[in-house]
């Protein structure tokens, strides 16, 4: 009986037909050595630094984890790690910094890009960044309003954590999104992180449990009555983003990642995992009682349905599709039934007249600030806006605010209309490239890209009511996801898969 020899090309044919990248054979010994060295150093460090400050130990282990991931060339994990650092360490400050200038995520992103550029290879080439000149012009022009602020350090902080980090994470996403497999791995890591935040939001609102609670944030939450829903004793969950509206924005946008992964997966185990993640994010979202986030999520659901709804129906058999739709509807109905009292309180909160009036007043004030400073803005920090927007405050805004509750108005008010136009141009170009990649993908791949696109769309919708695109931890995630699905590397990979199938 003849023996059939299977070549690497043959074993990778199914992956190529599906658009998946076929991993190149490589020596795994350096990776194993890096893991062993990391574990040994971690044990030694744990013993050596037992008497040193917790901040120093946390920074040491953060550097150690980053170095290990870079040594293993686990690019998708590094990208997800950056977003976790941006939220937990830079924003929430699990370990308070000596100075209030969070740039840890910035440093990790810069190191990652340097490694990706100088250690590029045939298997991991550097992907040119489309519209890089627009980003450079945007960052250059944004320097001028930094110099006009009341506190220069605060303006520099805003410039770095919002504008510079957005550019860096967009480039990181471009490099990571080299093929559909890398995009899936990135979205899977981010979905797991979102489920963790959703679960923490549930613990915080339902059981009063806050992980890594610091005296600083405890005192702050007590001072504002824990963001109680007006007229009730219900606590609005803010998780590590502190503000329930910010937490709601995060959960509303991130829920579409496990949704896309759910339809992209082909095994029941994977679908069960992503269904659990969807449920955790959904429950956390409801407990934020964020009306704007839920409205933006509804808009994202429309976008997802338009992009992939009829494609899913055409791809799968009618009985299977109806069964999936019925199961999803039953699961959603079960969640809403269990949380029916929370849904009722959410409706009451949504119809409170002061919420809409205050938001309308904030927008009107922002427009008056832009009218008075159309080219230069008032200065690139929220503290500067808090002081310099006061002469323009309208009667509907019955309290002083640090921003006009609209990311686009915020950029124009702080930096001027030229910076806003550049921001819109960059965002529009990236969205157009993402749509081009979506159209080039197969029906199966479109469910994954469509979920990521709905995530970005939800962030954009909610930016009309809160500072979503201009909130540091949300901005880095949005630009990372958008960079991954708009990457020219992904376009080449999808084009190569089409060529293989023809």
Image (spheres, rainbow, N blue to C red):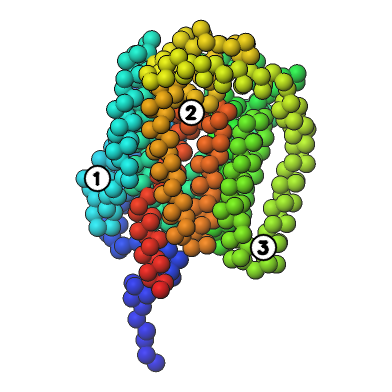
Structural crowding at the residue carrying mark 2, measured as other residues with C-alpha within 10 Å and reported as few (<14), some (14–19) or many (≥20): many
Q: Earlier in the sequence, mark 3 or mark 1?
A: 1
At a point 37% along the width and 18% down the height, the residue shown is 376
Q: Secondary structure at mark 1?
A: helix
> Residue most toward the bottom?
1
At a point 54% along the width and 16% down the height, the residue shown is 365
Q: Secondary structure at mark 2?
A: helix
> In the picture shown, does residue 416 fall above or below 389?
below
Mark whose residue sits in front, 3 or 2: 2
Describe residue 145's horizontal placement relative to residue 239 as left or right. left
Q: CA distance from mark 1 to mark 2?
A: 33 Å
- Residue of label 1: 117
What's the mark number on residue 408? Answer: 2
Q: CA distance from mark 3 to mark 2?
A: 39 Å
Q: CA distance from mark 3 to mark 1?
A: 44 Å
At a point 35% along the width and 42% down the height, the residue shown is 172
């Amino acid at each position: 009986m003849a023996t059939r020899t299977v070549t690497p090309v043959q074993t990778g044919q199914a992956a190529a037909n599906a658009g998946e990248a076929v991993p190149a054979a490589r020596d795994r010994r350096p990776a194993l050595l890096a893991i062993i060295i990391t574990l040994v150093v971690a044990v030694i460090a744990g013993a050596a630094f037992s008497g040193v400050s917790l901040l120093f130990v946390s920074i040491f282990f953060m550097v150690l984890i980053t170095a290990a991931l870079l040594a293993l060339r686990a690019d998708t994990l590094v990208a997800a790690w950056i977003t976790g650092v941006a939220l937990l360490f830079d924003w929430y400050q699990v370990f308070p910094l000596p100075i209030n200038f969070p740039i840890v995520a910035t440093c990790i992103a810069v190191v990652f890009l340097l490694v990706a550029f100088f250690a590029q290879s045939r298997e991991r080439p550097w992907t040119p960044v489309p519209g890089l000149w627009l980003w450079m012009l945007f960052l250059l022009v944004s320097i001028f309003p930094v110099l006009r602020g009341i506190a220069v350090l605060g303006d520099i902080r805003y410039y770095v954590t919002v504008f510079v980090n957005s550019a860096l994470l967009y480039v990181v996403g471009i490099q990571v999104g080299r093929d559909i497999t890398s995009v899936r791995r990135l979205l899977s890591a981010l979905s797991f992180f979102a489920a963790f935040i959703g679960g923490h939001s549930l613990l915080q609102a339902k059981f009063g449990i806050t992980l890594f609670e610091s005296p600083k944030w405890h005192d702050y939450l007590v001072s504002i009555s824990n963001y109680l829903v007006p007229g009730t004793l219900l606590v609005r969950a803010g998780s590590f983003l502190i503000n329930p509206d910010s937490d709601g924005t995060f959960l509303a946008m991130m829920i579409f990642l496990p949704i896309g992964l759910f339809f992209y997966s082909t095994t029941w185990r994977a679908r069960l995992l992503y269904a659990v993640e969807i449920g955790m994010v959904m429950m956390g979202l409801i407990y934020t009682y964020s009306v704007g986030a839920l409205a933006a999520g509804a808009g994202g659901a429309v976008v997802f349905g338009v992009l992939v709804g009829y494609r899913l129906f055409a791809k799968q058999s009618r009985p299977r599709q109806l069964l999936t739709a019925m199961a999803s509807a039953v699961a959603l109905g079960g969640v809403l039934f269990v949380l029916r009292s929370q849904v009722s309180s959410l409706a009451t909160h949504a119809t409170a007249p002061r919420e809409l009036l205050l938001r309308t007043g904030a927008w009107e004030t922002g427009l008056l600030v832009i009218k008075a400073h159309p080219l230069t803005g008032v200065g690139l920090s929220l503290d500067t806006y808090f002081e310099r927007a006061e002469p323009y405050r309208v009667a509907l805004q019955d309290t002083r605010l640090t921003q006009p509750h609209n990311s686009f108005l915020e950029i124009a008010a702080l930096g001027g209309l030229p910076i806003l136009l550049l921001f819109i141009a960059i965002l529009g170009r990236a969205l157009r490239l993402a749509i081009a990649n979506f159209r080039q993908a197969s029906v199966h791949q479109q469910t994954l890209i469509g979920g990521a696109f709905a995530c970005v769309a939800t962030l954009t919708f909610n930016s009309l009511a809160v500072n979503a695109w201009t909130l540091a931890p949300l901005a880095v995630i949005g630009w990372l996801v958008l960079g991954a699905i708009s990457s020219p590397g992904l376009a080449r990979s999808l084009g190569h898969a089409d060529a293989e199938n023809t």
